[in-house]
Image (cartoon, rainbow, N blue to C red):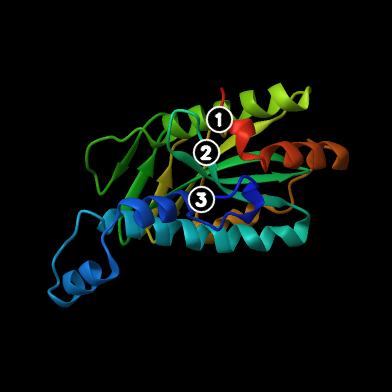
Amino acid sequence: MADDLERNPPGAGLIETVATRGPSFWQRAVDKVLRRPSEWDTWYAGLEGERRVGRELARLRAHGWRVLHGIPKGNGGDIDHLLIGAGGVFAVNTKRHPGASVWVGDDMAKVNGGPPVPYPAAARAEAAHVRRVLERHCGFAVPVDPVLVFVGVESLRSSVTQHAVRVFREREVAALGPLSGKLTPDQVERIYAVARHRRAWLRD
């Protein structure tokens, strides 16, 4: 991936992982013909989810928002998307669960009534990480909110209190577009100038 994160497409982290460690084109073709499941199926599903959310976030540029994808974390992994604008900064985490029923609480989520998974807690931790990095380099307070976006779900219920984590289906992220009043235009440009540089994220 490039040092300038503005060049990253949605799913940049997954694209890099699949390119360096994933199956070859021919292996994928054989698995598809034989309808054979692959350990990489979840990676490809995740990539499709990030691409779909990336397309929705791109629409928000018309409202003056800046969008980045594949923000690296110093301890490995990445933040799926970062949205920066007058309404603040949003660390966006994408989850793809086709046809599933999802419930989200303050700390945990359940998919199809299964065991709790810490999606909200992880989203808050990512937002806190983003805030630390940006404030260290910008020199002023940066409001960062966590966002969970679920792709392809059949139903989505949220019991999150006080907007600790914003929870959306992919098409609902448009609700962020009109938000304003938290950052000045100069602050938006300063934050974006910092956020787009990979090296800013490699130390926390």
Q: Where 197 falls versus 13 (above or below)?
A: above
Q: Where 172 falls versus 70 (above or below)?
A: below
- Residue 81 image position (x, y, % from top left): 56, 47
- Residue 17 image position (x, y, % from top left): 38, 50
Residue contact between numbered discs 2 and 1, judged by CB atoms under 8 Å: yes
Q: Which residue is mark 3?
A: 168
Q: Where 175 falls versus 133 (above or below)?
A: below
Disc on the earlier residue, 1 or 3: 3
User: Is residue 184 visible from the viewing direction of this image?
Assistant: yes
- Residue 145 image position (x, y, % from top left): 61, 35
For the residue marked with disc 2, what is the amino acid?
Pro
Q: In which quarter of the view is residue 43 placed?
A: bottom left
Disc on the earlier residue, 3 or 2: 2
Q: CA distance from mark 2 to mark 1?
A: 7 Å
Q: CA distance from mark 3 to mark 2?
A: 23 Å
Q: Secondary structure at mark 3?
A: strand
Determine the residue positioned at 37% across, 57% down.
19
